[in-house]
Amino acid sequence: MPFVKQLLSTERNVQLQYLFWAVFGVAFACAYFPVITNLVHAWSYSDDYSYGFIIAPVAAYMLWQKREVFLEKQAIGSWSGLLLAIGALFLYAVSKIGEMQTIASLSMIVFLWGAVIFLFGYGVFRACFLPLVFLAFMIPVPAQIIARLTIPLQLLVTKASVGLASFSGIPIFHDGNIIQLPQGTFQVVQACSGLRSIMTMLTLGTVLAYFTLRSNILRGALLLLAIPIALAVNILRVFVLISALYFLSIDLSEGTLHTCLGLAMFGIALGLFLAAGKGLALCER
């Protein structure tokens, strides 16, 4: 009889588990379908966030790589996860009333956190924490934050590149983000602020850190390096534009040459980033 009771109890638990999975799945689909639609629209119509399409597949691959770890951990759900999921839905309702798309998107990720904690427990949640955090890169940075960061970064890139040019003997002057040369004038626009490069490097850095480093401290260090690398390469790009115009009378600020220069600078940034990752990986040996 004890064996039969245990068997019935196990079957009942499995049925309840399937029921909870179904409830969370339906709640997620019904509540967050508009959020997913808005995100796909943002990725489709903005070059700055087109990488959003690959975030979820990469996160899924990260989780797949951890499948053996998940099997080793006992799935003991926690009711606190249900509270977190309910809180996320409340936050989503508030964001819909206030038309705050970024908050609505963040609530979707928090809902997934709560679902994992409730269904599988904190042990599994800790094991898949980084892939779940990585999903935040799907969300476009709010325009208010972009506006606050862009102008200081534009001025930083302008001053640094003009300083390099002046040190190289180029007669140059700048007024704000307007650069004046004997051959002409050009402007360091928002796209040249380096913010796009920083976001790209942070995204790549998270993936690289996850697969190549074991220490969370070194992973954090690699992510921090993404910012100075992106800014340095962007300063180099503007300096090359200045040098090409002054010494060669070639305008690299538009057209195919500008695109080729951007690709070359991205290659340099990626190379520096990979080298930094390898250097940090040596510290773990």
Image (cartoon, helix red, strand yellow):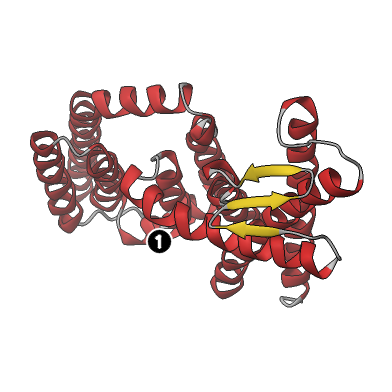
* Residue 209 seen anywhere in this rendered image of the structure: no
In the foreground, 115 or 275: 275
Which residue is depicted at the point 76% across and 54% down? Answer: 239
Horizontally, residue 88 falls left or right of residue 253, namely left
Q: Which residue in the structure is indicated by mark 1?
A: 126
User: Residue 276 placed where, x, y %?
Assistant: 74, 65
Residue name at image x 28 percent, y 56 percent:
76
Q: Position of residue 2 (x, y in %)?
A: 18, 51
Quadrant hosting residue 22: top left
Q: 88 left or right of 76?
A: left
Residue 33, placed above or below residue 201 = above
Secondary element at tag 1: helix
- Residue 130 located left or right of residue 210: left
Q: Amino acid at mark 1?
A: Arg
Q: Residue at x 71, y 30 (%)?
A: 254
Instruction: Name the one closer to the observer, 158 or 22.
Output: 158
Taking depth in this image into account, of 67 and 269 the one nearest to the observer is 269
- Label 1 crowd (10 A; few <14 / some 14-19 / many >=20): few
The picture quadrant where one finds residue 26 is top left
User: Is residue 91 among the parts visible in the rendering?
Assistant: yes
Q: Quadrant of residue 47?
A: top right
Tell me the quadrant of the picture where the C terminus can be found: bottom right
Q: Residue at x 9, y 42 (%)?
A: 94
Give x and y (percent) for residue 146. Answer: 40, 48
Is residue 251 depicted above or below 207 in this figure?
A: above
